[in-house]
Amino acid sequence: MPSAPQVSATTETPDYPPDLQRMLEMSAFAEVPGEPCLAREMERPAWTGEPEVRTRLREVRSDSLWLARWARENLTGRLAYAGVGYDFAPRPGAALTDAPPPLIYEIVVTGSGSIRPPPLRDRAKDVPVVVRYDAPLSHGEFMARREHGGPTARQLLPTLPGEGGSPSRSWAVYLMIGNSKKEGVVDDALSQCDVLRRAYRLPVLMEFFEGSMTSLDMMPAPME
């Protein structure tokens, strides 16, 4: 991971549309403070590697796959994401704990119309299903914006081998940029932050690596 540039890529707070501004606020925890579009290297708590924790997460994911199918079939047009996670507060990465928070199954949808998902069962029966309303975009809308902004990113960032991101991954587009040791690559890329945010109409987070890649599979995190 390269060191942050000496001068921030953006010196003034841009005026963004309300939906984009809201997503920027939602994804801020994943960005290096004071460095717009520079992805923060997230610390992994030690408990994530404990065998008991990993086994329990795997069990709940396995026994909740059917609920993801239910969400896709019944919440078409509204679903942002659905899947198993930890009940971090206020946001993932904001306050790491010494022990794993409770597992929840989270269903995030646009709009305020009430939905009643069925409860989980089998090994996941003790995991609550939490519905969160008024998401800024559905998964389909997010991916359409990502596709629309891609050509601009590829034009502005010649060392960009691929992109990723989804509502379940910080509500941001992730851009992997190579040759980070080459002079000017990091600063030049970050200087395009505002242009890229407007092209995608989404938050943009850049991750830098040394060397180059001919191809990169950066698919969005799957809905469980």
Image (tube, grey):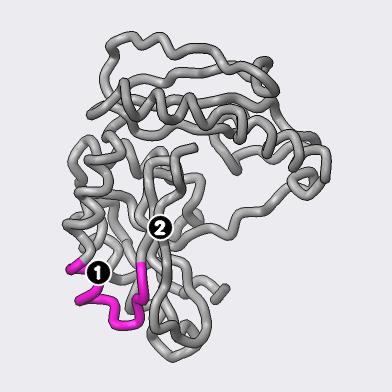
Q: Secondary structure at mark 1?
A: helix
Q: Secondary structure at mark 2?
A: loop
Confirm whether the magenta stretch covers residue 160. Answer: yes
Tell me the crowding category of disc 2: few under 14, some 14 to 19, or many 20 or more residues within 10 angstroms, Cα based.
few
**Quadrant in the rendering for residue 150:** bottom left
Rendered residue at 44%/14% (across/down): 117
The mark total stands at 2
Q: 80 above or below 40?
A: above
Kindly identify the amino acid type of the residue bearing the numbered disc 2: Met
Residue 128, placed above or below residue 55: above
Is residue 93 placed above or below 5 in the rendered structure? Answer: above
Residue 99 magenta: no
**Circle on res. 153:** 1
Q: Residue at x 38, y 59 (%)?
A: 164
Instruction: Give the CA distance from mark 2 to mark 1.
Output: 16 Å
Q: Please, what is the three-letter code of the amino acid marked with disc 1? A: Ala
Residue 218 in sight here:
yes
Q: Residue 16 at what x, y percent from top left?
A: 21, 45
Asked whether the residues under the numbered discs 2 and 1 touch, taking CB atoms below 8 Å apart as contact, a structural biologist would say no
Q: Which residues are magenta?
A: 151-162
Which numbered tag is attached to residue 219?
2
| Residue 136, x across and y down, in percent | 28, 32
Is 156 placed left or right of 100 in the picture? left
Q: Position of residue 45 (x, y in %)?
A: 74, 47
Q: Please identify the quadrant where the N terminus is shown.
A: bottom right
Q: Which mark is residue 145?
A: none
In this view, the residue in front, 63 or 32, is 63
Q: Say which residue appears at 68% left-offset and 39% top-offset.
A: 58
Query: In the image shown, does 188 or 202 lie closer to the viewer?
Result: 202
Tell me which corner region of the image, top left, top right, bottom left or bottom right, holds residue 223.
Answer: top left
Residue 211 percent location from the top left of the image: 50, 87
